[in-house]
Amino acid sequence: MDFRPLERPAGAFQQPLTPEQIEAVFERVIGPGTEVESATELGWGGYNTTYRVELADGPVILRVAPEPARQTRIEWQFMRNEYLATPYFAPIAHLLPRTAAADFTHELVPRDYVVQAVLRGKAGPDVLPAYPPAERGPFYRELGRLTRLVHGVCGSGFGAVAGPHFATWSEALVAYFADTALDLEDRGLVAADVREVGELAYRDAALLDEITEPRLLHGDLWTINVMLEADLTVTGVYDHDRSWWGDPAADWPIRMALAKPGAERDEFWAAYGPLDDSPNARRRMLYYRARHLGALRLERHRLDREEKLADSYDELAAVLDELRSGRVGAA
């Protein structure tokens, strides 16, 4: 087998499989005698370890989760969450990678893994830079349409799709902030600001619980998790391991579409539709921004992005200042 792992430091979060482990995986999920011609580790993404594997009858994708000991509370069993969430993404099912096999037994390797079909097209970051921002409008319009389709799916409780589920939106958020703080402290990071956001969310329960209907959130639907044709046609959507039931305004694509206004982002809103811009909705958006910043702090630490890690404290301090004062800034 031609084995091509990425070069990583010995202590890097993402750890490779051995060629022997990859061969054993395909002996199990395809059958005895399966020949693996090559396995090439792919570079996009910073959580699962992902390979494009060439078999005799064509290519597949092998995605391998981190060992349980490397997973945090807010990222616990992400691969299983994605696996369980997939049927709820039925409105965009034609764009999702088909799962050919999944193994959560840890009998061959001490990690969850799935084998999936290869999506048509190229990763968004490999295609979009060829277009100036003014020409990316059709892509953002389609992204807005797809996001709206996802948000149209209703659930029965708040929280990660795989659980635990909460009866109210405030309970789900308060628990998330508590878990994020514990995860940060486990890694020697200061988390007093995240804890304070959680305390404020608890006091603001009535405002948060104006959200009464859990809606499906992708969790990471943006340029890095789509496949595109050269003309910017979306041919695939993947990595919904962060999927949640909650307020659509809390989803990552909403945050990203709001973060950098511009003509191309206007196309997103033209397809998605307007957001609630009431004072209460704008205050809720502060909690959602804090939620994203806490998760990003953890991710930046995991990926050794120290300069960005420091920025998260300043960014969250600004959010806390608004929450404490009762002022409501721009969403």
Image (cartoon, grey):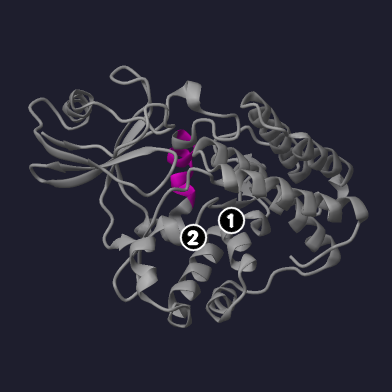
Location of the N terminus by quadrant is: top left
Q: Nearer the viewer, residue 148 or 35?
A: 35
Label placed on residue 222: 2
Q: Quadrant of the C terminus?
A: bottom right
* Mark 1 secondary-structure assignment: helix
76, above or below 294, in the image: above
Q: Amino acid at mark 2?
A: Trp
Type of secondary structure dominating the magenta stretch: helix
Residue 297 visible = yes
The answer to whether mark 1 and mark 2 are in CB contact below 8 A is yes
Specify whether 51 is left or right of 196.
left
Give the residue at mark 1: 252
For this orientation, the residue located farthest to the right is 325
In magenta, the rendered stretch is 80-88
First in sequence: mark 1 vs mark 2: 2
> Residue 317 or 22: which is nearer the viewer?
317
Given residues 120 and 89, the one toward you in this image is 120
Q: How many marks?
A: 2
Residue 138 appears at what percent x and percent y?
44, 78
- Horizontal and vertical percent position of residue 310: 65, 44
- Residue 193 numbered mark, or none: none
Q: Type of residue at label 1?
A: Trp
User: Residue at 33% of width from left, 51% of height from top?
Assistant: 97
Can the viewer see residue 152? no
How far apart are the alpha carbons under marks 1 and 2?
8 Å
Side of 199 where 51 appears, left or right: left
Q: Is residue 25 magenta?
A: no
Give left or right: position of 299 versus 13: right
Relative to 214, 149 lies left or right: left
Q: Residue at x 8, y 33 (%)?
A: 35
Q: Residue furthest top?
A: 107
